[in-house]
Image (cartoon, rainbow, N blue to C red):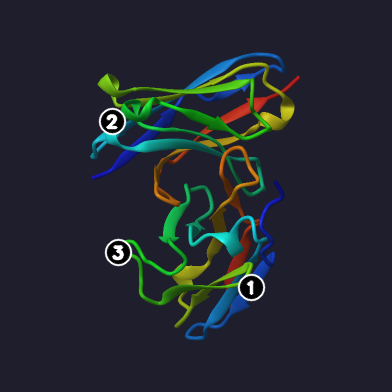
Amino acid sequence: QSALTQPASVSGSPGQSITISCTGTSSDIGGYTYVSWYLQYPGKGPQLMIYDVNKRPSGVSDRLSGSKSANTAFLTISGLQAEDEADYYCCSYTTTSTSFYVFGTGTKVTVL
Amino acid sequence: EVQLVESGGGLVQPGGSLRLSCAVSGFSFSGIWMTWVRQAPGKGLECIGRITTTGSGGATAYAESVKDRFIISRDDSKNTLYLQMNSLKIEDTAMYYCTTLLIGRFHSWGQGTLVTVFS
């Protein structure tokens, strides 16, 4: 099972909106609504930010939103803030991995 | 407050073994599926395996990269998750995280424990 494909880096100025893509196949993103997104600060464990494509756990800012179209999922961060600078990983349920989940390659978000 | 605290990482030579532990608190451990996710230095995340609840048989599933070498188990009486790692390879060098697994998502994460396999 190959990792889902994300851009290596995305950047934006404070207040702007950015979107991170996550491309898979019909065996993962395209076939299921179990798409999630994780934020990871340097030296820290990841944190769940979005699940079931577009749901936010309690406590997660509503500036983050998720969507999906065919085999690609998207994470949009609006009103970019300094605290958004981190690594972001997508993840999907999959039928082609014996562990049933596949992560994306990761995207470094930089706030200019 | 939900807490997951991994321990047991360290230095080991190729072919060696190591057992990681994950002590949890703040939620009903026995009712939750659990996973181990690893991250090689400077790399992305990889789910290496999961275990269902004991009530569901404690069934396990593993990534091909660790199948037949790693074993996940749980002790509900101690609120602890384990990862027995055998026949370790240099490419197993990584930070190892335990997580709760709700339907379709890795909900809560620990801070990780570092495993370094060196010759």
Residue that lies at the very extreme toward the right in this rendered image: B119
Q: Quadrant of the C terminus of chain A?
A: bottom right
Q: Quadrant of residue A52?
A: bottom left
Does residue B101 lie above or below B82 as drawn?
Answer: below
Which of A41/A107 is in front?
A107
Residue at 64% of width from left, 21% of height from top?
A: B68
Which of B105/A94 is in front?
A94
Secondary structure beneath dot 2 equals: helix
Residue at 69% of width from left, 61% of height from top?
A: A5
In primary-sequence order, the first of circles 3 and 1 is: 1
Query: Taking B15 as reference, is A48 left or right?
Result: left
- What residue type is disc 3 on? Gly
Secondary structure beneath dot 3 equals: loop
What's the distance in space between the residues labelled 2 and 1, CA to CA? 40 Å
**Which residue is labeled 1 in the image?**
A10
Q: Are marks 3 and 2 on the same chain?
A: no
**Which residue is labeled 2 in the image?**
B30
Residue B108 visible in rendering: no
**Which residue is labeled 3 in the image?**
A59
- What residue type is disc 1 on? Val
Residue at 40% of width from left, 33% of height from top?
A: B52
Query: Taking A106 as reference, is A37 left or right?
Result: left
What's the distance in space between the residues labelled 3 and 1, CA to CA? 24 Å
Q: Quadrant of residue A23?
A: bottom right
Q: Chain of mark 1?
A: A
Which of labels 3 and 2 is toward the front?
A: 2
Residue B35 visible in rendering: yes
Residue at 53% of width from left, 59% of height from top?
A: A32
Secondary structure beneath dot 1 equals: strand
Query: Taking B94 as reference, is B31 left or right?
Result: left
Q: Chain of mark 2?
A: B
- What residue type is disc 2 on? Ser
